[in-house]
Amino acid sequence: MSSSEIRRAPVMADVAQLAGVSHQTVSRVLNDHPNVRSETRDRVLAAIDDLGYRRNLAARALVTRHSRTLGVVSFDTTLYGPASTLYGIEQAARAAGYFVSIVSLKTLTAEHVVEAVEFLSDQGVDGIVVVAPQRTAARALAGLSTQVPVVAVEGGRAGGKPAVSVDQADGARQVVEHLLSLGHETVWHVAGPNDWLEAEGRAEGWRKALTAAGHPIPDPLIGDWSPRSGYDAGRRLAEVPGLTAVFVANDQMALGLLRAFAELRIRVPSQISVAGFDDIPEAEFFSPPLTTVRQDFGEVGRRSIEILLRRVESGEDLGYEHSVVPARLVVRESSARTKTA
Amino acid sequence: MSSSEIRRAPVMADVAQLAGVSHQTVSRVLNDHPNVRSETRDRVLAAIDDLGYRRNLAARALVTRHSRTLGVVSFDTTLYGPASTLYGIEQAARAAGYFVSIVSLKTLTAEHVVEAVEFLSDQGVDGIVVVAPQRTAARALAGLSTQVPVVAVEGGRAGGKPAVSVDQADGARQVVEHLLSLGHETVWHVAGPNDWLEAEGRAEGWRKALTAAGHPIPDPLIGDWSPRSGYDAGRRLAEVPGLTAVFVANDQMALGLLRAFAELRIRVPSQISVAGFDDIPEAEFFSPPLTTVRQDFGEVGRRSIEILLRRVESGEDLGYEHSVVPARLVVRESSARTKTA
DNA sequence: GTGGCAATTGTGAGCGCTAACAACCCTTGT
DNA sequence: ACAAGGGTTGTTAGCGCTCACAATTGCCAC
């Protein structure tokens, strides 16, 4: 139409020509270099606007060796926790002007984690957040050969990498103390799967709180986070004589437990009190509404990006660091005073 | 140690030198060019392995004009549906050797959608999947100026872009016919928010199925997908005389409804049958377990990537195309025969 | 033995950008 | 009036890769 037959995307040189400056001046304007006369800047900006110019980030990345992209390795982003964390990460990263590239893993073996990290490294990400809630995964981080800064979420101190996590143990403590304060003799526990750091943290908090209060510690049951495993646990717990309170390691399993109790005509909370962990949006509408522990996943995401970017932008290995996000008890109707009183 | 002081990452020339070939031959090996003697190929591969060489994708992208990255624009990836779709997309894309870059939007205004698409275009993605379940968002796609291929998920035909969606109307039809077959006079409906295409599809399927069977069509209530809005709807519906069956537009709202009925001592399903939509993992463990419609989000993700990659790799605008994924009724205990019989 | 063709390998250029340096302008102080 | 110096702009040289083409090799038919 106007001049050329084929309309290829304008490049910096085109802008420079239109504005009557050198391409380097265009680059300066784009990078907010201070020493550009404002009149020149305006002329360049106008030309950019005119041509609809957008800078080629591949070319930029090639020379700066920075892609302005962060990678996230996560486990099953279908679950509420990982999904919310991912969301927080993405929001924080984009606010800082970074792109977010993700890898969702079905299984969190050390091998897969390493593979995912390398996949992202290949892409040239500037930093990586690994949501590594399993011990094996966290440990895999230790042996990472990559130059790229890495932050672990829920990775504990297992990997030697900087980490952000929710204070699982303290959340569990709050639940247990709450239940004990209602007069329960002790509190049973349905734990998450073995290798999981969150499961361990919650079990540990539960155990310590019982010990501290001088109450007996029943054998915990072990689930796999799914409602079904909670259901199975509920069936088993229903046969325990004298049981009045159960702390379930997550809300989904707690739902299964409630279902099992409902089928068996066990009333919650009048016969048995139940508490969960996570505070998923549904928890408030369970029957009965679930007492649980709220995790601020958004804050976890934000902090992990903050720590990561500090390292990316300083270019230094700032060593180990652990940021702990507090958890908060949310009391609802599934927990109540024992009838014994 | 060995030769140089500072150990910078090896580049193609280093590999070439070690293998005693030209950098171009290394490039050929990396790109599976057919005409390379297998002995040469082995030598190059050995050198690559030796040096731990990884090709610089920014440089590659600069010259090929392809980043092997796909963008995804999605609404609130915290929700089960979008999260599952995203998961499916990511799996399919990675299997095809593509990276996935995401943008999660809090609000799905046309402006934000356009902004997100441009953000991703800037990054140089080869194609974009927009999860655009709202009418306004879908329409925003029509006016997109970008050269990059775009596929809409749940975008209906609103945007003129190729689209993948679940057959919402047919899913709703199955639910309604199921409930009618159980002897209910009619089926009430708690719909999703107005502007949502999924909400419209489900409401339309519900209305048509009632019409086809010659049953009266009650005024639908309107929720916002949240359990709370389902709870509110439940409170209202409890006052409707003669009501025996409700089809709720998603499982979360159905949960709220169940909660409201539980509080009011309305028994489900003996007094009122309830059905949802989505089949979230929790639905099976609601009290009672929820009759609902399963959506295959993984399949949606896979198909959208398939369609997108066909366009990315052909480089052509293949025109409008609409792939519809079937939905499937899952009958559980929340729906039952009316007592009238 | 030699021309011709295919298979294999090498050479040079350039993708679009930024970093480093050089060059130029204009002030200001003496 | 002139040197000094800061602000502003231009020039050059790559970043590491792939593309197009040139050069070389091996092998066969004549």
Image (cartoon, coloured by chain):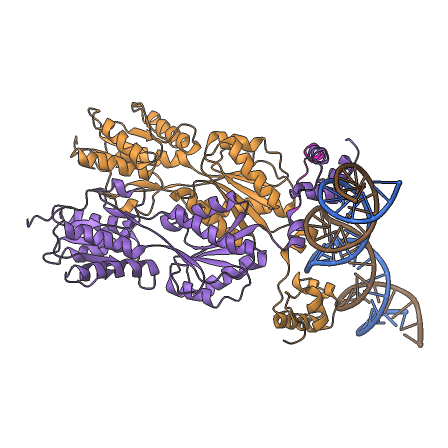
Chain colours: A purple, B orange, C brown, D blue
Q: Position of residue A133 (x, y in %)?
A: 38, 58
Q: Is residue B252 left or right of residue B24?
A: left
Observer-nearest residue: B100 or A93? A93
Observer able to see residue A56: yes
Observer-nearest residue: A310 or A304? A310
Q: Position of residue C18 (x, y in %)?
A: 68, 50
Q: Furthest-left residue in view?
A: A341
Question: Does the segment drawn in magenta span residue B300?
Answer: no
Q: How many marks?
A: 0
Give the quarter of the figure containing the N terminus of chain B.
bottom right
Q: Position of residue A126 (x, y in %)?
A: 56, 55
Observer able to see residue A249: no
* Vertical comparison of A59 with B268: above or below: below
Determine the residue positioned at 68% across, 40% down: A29
Observer-nearest residue: B242 or A39? A39
Q: Quadrant of residue B16?
A: bottom right
Observer-nearest residue: B72 or A167? A167
Q: Is residue B282 left or right of residue A38?
A: left
* Vertical comparison of A284 with B200: above or below: below
Q: Quadrant of residue B191?
A: top left
Q: Quadrant of residue B318?
A: top right
Q: Which residues are magenta?
A: A47-56
Q: Position of residue B235 (x, y in %)?
A: 23, 29
* Vertical comparison of A129 with B107: above or below: below
* Vertical comparison of A302 with B136: above or below: below
Determine the residue positioned at 61% across, 71% down: B49
Give the quarter of the figure containing the C terminus of chain B.
top left
